[in-house]
Amino acid sequence: MIDETETIEEFLTRGSADVEEAVRKAAAAEILPRFRRLAEHEVDRKSGPHDLVTDADRLAEQRLTEVLGALLPGSVVVGEEAVHANPATYEAIRGDAPVWIIDPVDGTRQFVHGDEGFCTLVALAHRGVVQASWTYAPVPDRFATAVRGRGAFLDGERLFAGPPAPGRDLAVATSHPDFTTDEQKHALRALWADGLAPRPCGSAGLEYLALARGELDAVAFSWEAAWDHAAGLLLVEEAGGAHLTLTGEPFRVTGGNTLPFTAARDAATARRVAHLLATGG
């Protein structure tokens, strides 16, 4: 078991490219061959009609679990599909071992409907702190990476989100109404205000990438599953952005956050959106 963050930093220096290669190979082997070719028996429902899982999700996660665990001995894996099968495995995020957090197909609904707006998300966390992330959009073949303290990159180019342009409405992606409680809907309704332009979100990972690129101003999300947020939040942080919960604290991948929460391309925007969510306007 690793007990020094420096050891993880050393691993990332020598092994980050190996993680990227593993993600690319998993997508090439298990995801892309099924894109727009899914048979009916390859798609299942989990908690409801909008919560879908496919053979691509399951098999890509299995492949990544095997490869990433071997790359970093002593690490554990928390994957979306494995947690669905055994919720107790989620507790590893709160443990002392380095943990790989995997969403094999973020945006499964889009994937099932033949929309290219999906991605594969991998993050490496240790004792509740995300140390590195990999975001891969396989159809356009775009790869974003971030390492804590070393910046965020898209296809090798440094990302800087920067502040929103003055004088225009803030573009905000929000949780889809199908996935919110009545109380959360009430909080999110505060974003339908002068100076903001909210819309339902797509793939969380791609929304975070849009933030890091300065193409989106903020997100407001009502759920805290680590596989949806860990990779993207580090990407946004390393591009100069910020994230806040309703209590004014940063989002914690270990859970227990006051929801909804926001991430934004700069700290001032994060504070503005968090204040609206907390006060109802």
Image: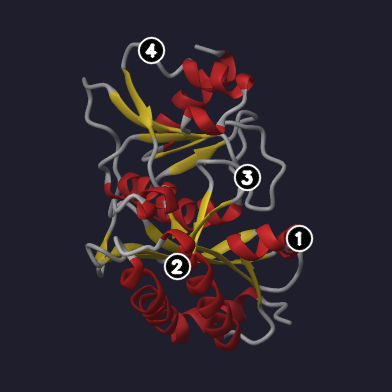
Q: Which residue is mark 2?
A: 56
Residue 109 falls left or right of residue 154: right
Q: Name the residue at 57% across, 29% down.
A: 180
Residue 197 lies, in percent from the top left, at 31, 22
Q: Which residue is mark 1?
A: 91
How far, Cα to Cα, is label 4 from label 3? 32 Å
Q: Compared with residue 13, is residue 96 higher up or lower down, i.e. above or below?
A: above
How far, Cα to Cα, is label 3 from label 2? 18 Å
Earlier along the polypeptide chain: callout 3 or callout 2?
Answer: 3
Mark carried by residue 83: none
Answer whether labels 3 and 2 touch (C-beta < 8 Å). no
Residue 226 lies, in percent from the top left, at 59, 53
Callout 3 crowding tier (Cα within 10 Å): few <14, some 14–19, many ≥20? few
Q: Which residue is mark 3?
A: 47
Earlier along the polypeptide chain: callout 4 or callout 2?
Answer: 2
Q: Amino acid at mark 4?
A: Ala
